[in-house]
Image: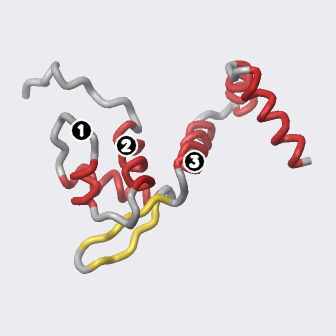
Amino acid sequence: MQSDESQPRRRPGALATEILTVLSEAAAALTPGEVLELLPRARKLSYSTVVTTLTRLWEKDAVTRHRDGRAYRYAAIGDPSSLVAWRMSRLLDAEADHASVLTRFVSGLSEQDERTLRDLLADES
């Protein structure tokens, strides 16, 4: 099987991110077919790829779903900032050394973002 070099391989999690974005921007829950139609893709994806990704997102509690006839309709759990926070938590959970990851994360923040984070942490105390 030949690979299509004009179509670069997606980064891990890129399709899930695109699907979460489509769902968060939708006015109502969407079927997998509706999600497929709304994805900003130059490359054609299969319906089953979208269904598999939606199912995995549902299993990770990133989306909700309910039956609508023979299909499911999916919706994002929250707004775009909630989705980013969810993604950040998932990335942190993938690493054993949370302190090292958080230290590097904070050291890479702009002064304003670091100040905002410190203010948020102070408010939690």
Crowding near pointer 3: few (<14 within 10 Å), some, many (20+)?
A: some
Name the image quarter holding residue 100: top right
Give the residue furthest to the front: 27
Q: Quadrant of the N terminus?
A: top left
Pinpoint residue 95: horizontal percent, then vertical percent.
61, 34
Disc 2 marks which residue? Answer: 18
SS under mark 1: loop
The three-letter code of the residue at mark 3 reads Trp
Give the residue furthest to the bottom: 69
Pinpoint residue 62: horizontal percent, then vertical percent.
49, 56
From this view, report whether residue 101 is shown above or below residue 37.
above
Q: Earlier in the sequence, mark 1 or mark 2?
A: 2
Q: Earlier in the sequence, mark 3 or mark 2?
A: 2
Pinpoint residue 74: horizontal percent, then vertical percent.
38, 64
Q: Residue at x 28, y 55 (%)?
A: 35
Disc 3/disc 2 C-alpha distance (Å)? 14 Å
Q: Residue at x 37, y 43 (%)?
A: 18
From this view, report whether residue 88 is shown above or below residue 3.
below
Tally the marks: 3
Disc 3 marks which residue? Answer: 86
Disc 1 marks which residue? Answer: 41
From this view, report whether residue 45 is shown above or below residue 99.
below
Pinpoint residue 27: horizontal percent, then vertical percent.
40, 63
Q: Residue at x 76, y 21 (%)?
A: 111
Q: Is residue 68 left or right of residue 109?
A: left
Q: Is residue 42 left or right of residue 99?
A: left
Crowding near pointer 2: few (<14 within 10 Å), some, many (20+)?
A: some
Q: Are marks 1 and 2 in contact (CB under 8 Å)?
A: yes
Q: Residue at x 42, y 47 (%)?
A: 21
The three-letter code of the residue at mark 2 reads Glu
Q: Are marks 3 and 2 in contact (CB under 8 Å)?
A: no
SS under mark 3: helix
